[in-house]
Amino acid sequence: MEEIVLTDNGKLVLEYMQAHDRVFVGKDLGDAMNIKGIYPTLHSLIRKELVAASDPITRDFTNNKGETKPKEYKTYVLTEKGRHYSI
């Protein structure tokens, strides 16, 4: 079995997701953890089968012009492997 090696950000994100086991929007994870560029970390966790992409959600987004429109966001969840992975 291949050893899983996580980056520091990968460890932080996985630990956070394990502590709050629910559906996450990538932007919300990045904001909550103050990690810029959260998506490469999430994609790495997906490749390692610790996290999976889930159904997108739509919620309102206000752009820099002050216009509010619905926007679709990708979501992420832990896999069973990710839930039980020991960091």
Image (spheres, helix red, strand yellow):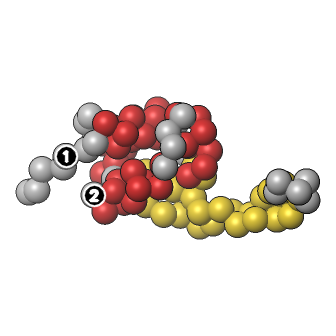
- In terms of secondary structure, where does tag 2 sit? loop
What's the residue type where badge 2 is placed?
Lys
Residue nearer the viewer, 47 or 20: 47
Look at 82% across and 57% down and name the residue there: 63
From the image, tell me which residue sits under label 2: 48
Look at 60% across and 49% down and name the residue there: 27
Tell me residue 20's x, y (percent): 52, 36
What's the residue type where badge 1 is placed?
Val
- In terms of secondary structure, where does tag 1 sit? loop
Mark earlier in primary sequence (2, 1): 1
Q: Give the quadrant of the N terminus.
A: bottom left
From the image, tell me which residue sits under label 1: 5
Question: How far apart are the alpha carbons under marks 2 and 1?
Answer: 9 Å
Residue nearer the viewer, 62 or 49: 62
Q: Give the quadrant of the C terminus.
A: top left
Look at 10% across and 56% down and name the residue there: 2
Tell me residue 12's x, y (percent): 39, 35
Tell me residue 62's x, y (percent): 84, 54
- How many numbered dots are placed on residues in this image? 2
Look at 63% across and 66% down and name the residue there: 56
The part of the image, by quadrant, that contains residue 55 is: bottom right
In the image as oriented, which residue stretches furthest toward the front? 65
Question: Label 1 crowding class (10 Å Cα cut-off): few <14, some 14-19, many 20+?
Answer: few
Question: Label 2 crowding class (10 Å Cα cut-off): few <14, some 14-19, many 20+?
Answer: some
Any part of residue 80 in sight: no
In the image as oriented, which residue stretches furthest toward the left? 1
Any part of residue 75 in sight: yes
Q: Is residue 56 left or right of residue 33?
A: right
Residue nearer the viewer, 14 or 69: 69
